[in-house]
Amino acid sequence: MDIGTPLKTLEIIGNDTTSILKANHSEMLNKGTREFILSVREDIFTNRSFKLPEDWDTSWDIKLGPIWTPAELDSTYLACWLLPEYLNPSASDADICVQANDRSGNGVVWENTNTEASNPTFTPELNGFKGMEFADTQYLYSLDESGDGELDPGTGDFAITMLVEFGTIGTSEKHVLCSDSTRDFALSVREESGNDSYKVYFNGSATKANATVDQTQPLIMTIGRSGGDQFMRHASISVNDPDITGTETVDIDNSQQFFIGAREHATADRLGITGFTGDIYEITFYNGTLSDDDRQSIEGYLAHKYAVTSYLHNDHPYKTNPPRAGTPA
């Protein structure tokens, strides 16, 4: 796909029936249904044959070009990618999110068919994007229809990065993410000794984080396993949380489902006890080792897309400018 002018912005204007894709706030690139326009924009973002135009403005202090997205990483590592553009409302209530579709290409579908009351709702917009808002008894779980276990990393490395805003926590443990009922992997929060704390589970055993939960603004965090060691990092700090350590080789390969906002669906321990309270706007799952450069690119992408750059630490490489997609090697 060739665009003959410096591409500084891409925007979608319109509705589900008729939308247009505009470049640089003025040049119309395409017109059609919103679904078609999203596919055109995705092609621009991910097309490996994209070349920088000869008249690209390199005199600016920023690197111009299509903004980098998680699709730039090798598809063998991107196991699942949930973002607002791929959330589906209920047919009977536009405020209820009944399904979240994966944009990674692996076809992972997240839904909850229990009752609409147990589905998350849509959040207020954050820089024009609505995420998923969870109350105590609301959750989604992944469907592994192909049987390939896309979200199950086995004993290998993995990383999950998300833009999240925490709501009320309290003394009941609330699970933000969970691999299964035995908690081979899980992230939860609860109030302990007057502080709101994170807990990371591997093989059913929890490690309490040093950092307390920040409820004042959205934050970008990455959690997972690298080189066999569990870790958790906020984009607001330059190092891993020192208390989330230890080698854990538990095999995360027997879970048919992952859960967002609950420990497990249709169980007594979920109802009003383990439900996450808060908002999740975007989340990526990677199987394999995520380099520091790639993690920082994901953080920069999220921070600039949702206008939360204030949460990036001062030395973050994308504190001022977003990551940009480069030319193919």
Image (cartoon, helix red, strand yellow):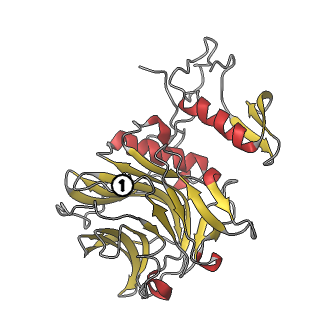
Whether residue 283 is situated above or below residue 291 in the rendered picture? below
Placement of the N terminus among the 4 image quadrants: top right
Question: Is residue 30 toward the left or the right of residue 247 in the image?
Answer: right
Nearer to the camera, 308 or 44: 44
The residue under the point 60% across, 65% down is: 132
Q: How far across and down, in percent of the image, does residue 228 sit?
A: 19, 55
The residue under the point 75% across, 70% down is: 93
Whether residue 221 is situated above or below residue 318 in the rendered picture? below
* Residue to which mark 1 is pinned: 149
Q: How far across and down, in percent of the image, does residue 157 sit?
A: 26, 51
Few, some or many residues within 10 Å of mark 1 (<14, 14–19, 20+): many
Nearer to the camera, 323 or 91: 91
Placement of the C terminus among the 4 image quadrants: top left
Occupied quadrant, residue 248: bottom left
Residue 9 visible here: yes
The residue under the point 31% across, 73% down is: 183
Question: Is residue 313 toward the left or the right of residue 92 in the image?
Answer: left
Occupied quadrant, residue 321: top right
Q: How far across and down, in percent of the image, does residue 291 sit?
A: 32, 42
Count of marks placed on residues = 1
Residue 217 visible here: no
Q: How far across and down, in percent of the image, does residue 222 sit?
A: 39, 56
Which amino acid does the dot numbered 1 rest on? Gly
Secondary structure at numbered mark 1: loop
Nearer to the camera, 268 or 45: 268
